[in-house]
Image (cartoon, rainbow, N blue to C red):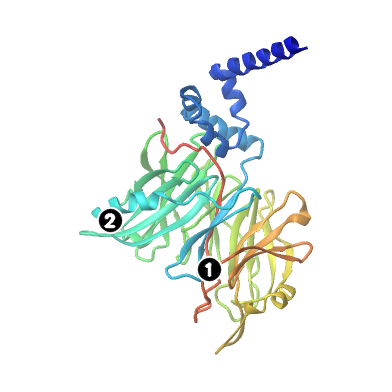
Amino acid sequence: MEESHMHKRLAITTAVDVIAGNADLLSEILLRLPARSLIRFSIVCKLWFSVITSMQFRLSHCRTLAFSNALSPSGIYFYNCLTKPQKIESLAFADNVTSLPPIQFLDQMAPNIRDTYEITQAKVMQSCNGLLMYVFTAKTDVGIIKIGIVYNPAKKEARVLQSPYKKYDAKFVYYNLISDPSKPPYYKVLCVTRLGSWFSDIDVSVYVLESESWSSCCRSSVPSFMNFESGVFWNGAIHWIGEYSSVYFDVNSEKVAMISMPPRPQGYCSQKIRYFGEWGGHLHLIQVQSLYAKKFNVLELDKDTWKWSVKYRVHLARLISSFPDMVQQTSFGIQYVFSILSVIRGEKEEDSVLLLTIPGKVVAYNLVRKTAKVVRELPGEVGDTLRFNHVSAYQYTESLFPLFSS
C-alpha cells in the first residue's frame, strides 16, 4: 500500500515537473488564469517569468479573455467630490478583494514631469479594457501643452505621449483611448484637435503601437459645442456626447460620423446629461429634467438600429427616504444630492444596478427590484455647491495588456 502511494506521488511530481519545464504546455495552462494570479506567478522561477512577461503571451492572454467574454470590469476608480482636492477612490467588485491597485505611476512620474513643466492640472480622463488615459496640462515657455499618459494599473506600466500638434491651444486638444484586444493593433490613442476660427472642424490623429508615431487620419466638421474628452469605446467606435449631438469615430473606417440624439426631457435645466457610459457591451445614457431630479430613465443604444430606447425607469423616492442626507435645503429649494457612477449590467437582468454616490456612501441601487445596498463608506463632507452631478468614474479591468511593441 505504501509503495502504491509512493508511485502515485512520484507520478504526480513527474507530471508537475514536465508541465513546469515545458514552456508551450505551461503557456496553454497559464492563459486560463486571471491577470492578478499571473502577476504573482511570474516570480515563481525564471521560466515562468519569461513566459508570463513575453509580448506574445500577454497579447494571447488578452485575446483569450476577450473572445471568452471574460474581460469584464473587476472594479472602478472614481473621483470623490466630497474631498478637496478631489481624491481618486476605488471600489472592487470581488468579495475577496478590498481595494484596486493604487495609481502609483503618478507619484513616480510626476516629479520628473514637474521638473520640466509647470503642471496646472492632472486627471484620469478615460478607461478602456484595462488601460487608463491620464492627462497632464502644463505651462511651457511657448504656451500650454497637454501630456497624455497611457497606464496599466495591474502591471504598473505607463507610456508617456505628447500632442502631435505644437501650434494649437492645448485647451482644444483632447486625448482618447481605444483598446481592443480582439484585433490588432490592440490599442490606439486618438488626439482630437479643434481647428478654425469657430472650432467647428476637428483633426483626428492616431498613435499606433507598432509604428510608435502619430498619423493624421481624418478631418471633419462637428458641432462647435461638442466636448471630446472622456470618450466611450463601444461597438467598434469611440463615442462622444453633447447636450444636443452625439459623434463617434469608427475604428475600422477611421471616419467621424453623427448619431441622432433621443428627445431631450423638458425642464429648465440646460445640462440634461447625468451619465454616459458602457458596461458589458451595452451603451447607456441618462438625461434628466432638472439637475437634481429623482426620477429619470436609463436609455440604451441598439447595436443594429443605432436608436435609443428606454431600458430602465428609475424613481429614487424609496432610496431618498432611506438616506435623508440626500435631501439638501438650498436657496433654490430642495435638492437631491447624488452622483451616478455607473450603470452595471448583471449576468441576470435582476442583478443590474445603478451605482451611486450619496453623502458619505457609495450605494448600489437595484434597477429591477428597486432596492439599495451600501457597498462602501465615503470620506468627506457635502460642500455649499452640492456639485454631485459630475463625478467621473472609470472601469478597472485586470489585464496584462502591453503598452510597448517590444
Which is more N-terminal, label 1 or label 2?
A: 2
Percent x, y for residue 313? 74, 67
Report the residue at 46% width, 23% height from top: 46
Q: Is residue 223 left or right of residue 16?
A: left
Q: Is residue 90 left or right of residue 205?
A: right
Q: Is residue 348 left or right of residue 163?
A: right
Query: Is the residue 337 above or below the residue 402 in the image?
Result: below
In this figure, which residue is indicated by the disc labeled 2?
Answer: 114
Name the residue type under label 2: Arg
Query: Is the residue 39 above or below the residue 21 in the image?
Result: below
Compute the Cα span from label 2 to label 1. Answer: 29 Å
Report the residue at 53% width, 66% height from top: 391
**Front residue of this view, candidates 246 and 27:** 27
In this figure, which residue is indicated by the disc labeled 1?
Answer: 379
| Residue 62 occupies quadrant | top right
Q: Is residue 181 left or right of residue 106?
A: right
